[in-house]
Image (tube, rainbow, N blue to C red):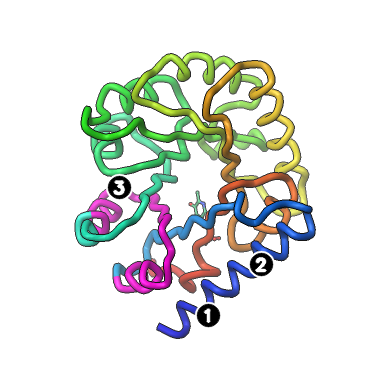
Amino acid sequence: MHNMSNKLTQVKSRIQQAAKSANRNPDDITLLAVSKKQSVEKVRELILQGQQDFGENYLQEAIEKIETLNDQQVRWHFIGPIQSNKTRSIATHFDWVHSVDRLKVAQRLNDQRPEHLPPLKICIQVNIDGEDTKSGVNPSEVATLCREIAKLDKIEMHGLMCIPAKEGTDAFTRMQALFKAVGDEISLHHWDTLSMGMSADLEEAIDAGSTIVRVGTALFGERKV
Ligand SMILES: *Cc1c(COP(=O)(O)O)cnc(C)c1O
């Protein structure tokens, strides 16, 4: 218990410091606790410490946690690769999806979002370093995709997400520029989110305007495999 709360305090203070160095308001940065391959008990401890946003990559594992913790006030974010035959389950169980990378997936999430739930909040995943192995949209295709997704009424498009190839490149500043360019080009009502930065590089991401940092190991320790 003490260990979890220490780690949460440490990560929050890293966010505060990074915001301060970047002349930003720390309240504009959301900490997303990435709980993939971590136990429900650890998630529960973080909830007790006031953590409200949790990210999951693997659908089956995520749904088990979501159902076990359904009495809790938690926002669930799906951040993993999306197979199109899994969209119904994602649209039913999650508040946010960070990893939308094609129109077909957005359309299915839109059509399958249950009527009684608010619109699903999404980010488009950008393959910012043009890696063959990584999912995500090519930066040059982001604006076109955004225009199409903006027509869907059960989807609320908030911004962009990336997982850079490695540290020490300017991937985050390129994302920041792309985010601004798309926002200037298309008028989008909820264009307010840059999901980038993880345990190792959240400071650089915050310096480049990140509004959601996705932190796993720095909060929970190493993942079970
Ligand atoms: C696992 C994962 C994270 C968290 O990574 P850490 O290095 O453990 O902080 C963040 N984003 C995505 C998309 C992930 O898959």
Dominant secondary structure of the residues highlighted in magenta in the image:
helix
Q: Residue at x 32, y 28 (%)?
A: 109
Q: Which mark is residue 6?
A: 1
Q: Residue at x 35, y 67 (%)?
A: 43
**Left or right of 183 on screen, residue 24:** right
Q: From mark 3 to mark 1, how far is it between C-alphas?
A: 29 Å
158 lies above or below 198? above
14 lies above or below 183? below
Q: From mark 2 to mark 3, how far is it between C-alphas?
A: 30 Å
**Left or right of 14 on screen, residue 77:** left
**Left or right of 224 on screen, residue 135:** right
Identified by mark 2, the residue type is Arg
**CB contact under 8 Å: marks 3 and 1:** no
Q: Position of residue 214 (x, y in %)?
A: 53, 54
Q: Secondary structure at mark 2?
A: helix
Q: Is residue 32 magenta?
A: no
**Left or right of 121 on screen, residue 132:** right
Q: Residue at x 26, y 35 (%)?
A: 117
Q: Which mark is residue 14?
A: 2
Residue at numbered disc 3: 59
Quarter residue 188 falls in:
top right
Q: Is residue 42 magenta?
A: yes
N-term mark: 3 or 1? 1
Query: Residues in magenta?
Result: 41-66
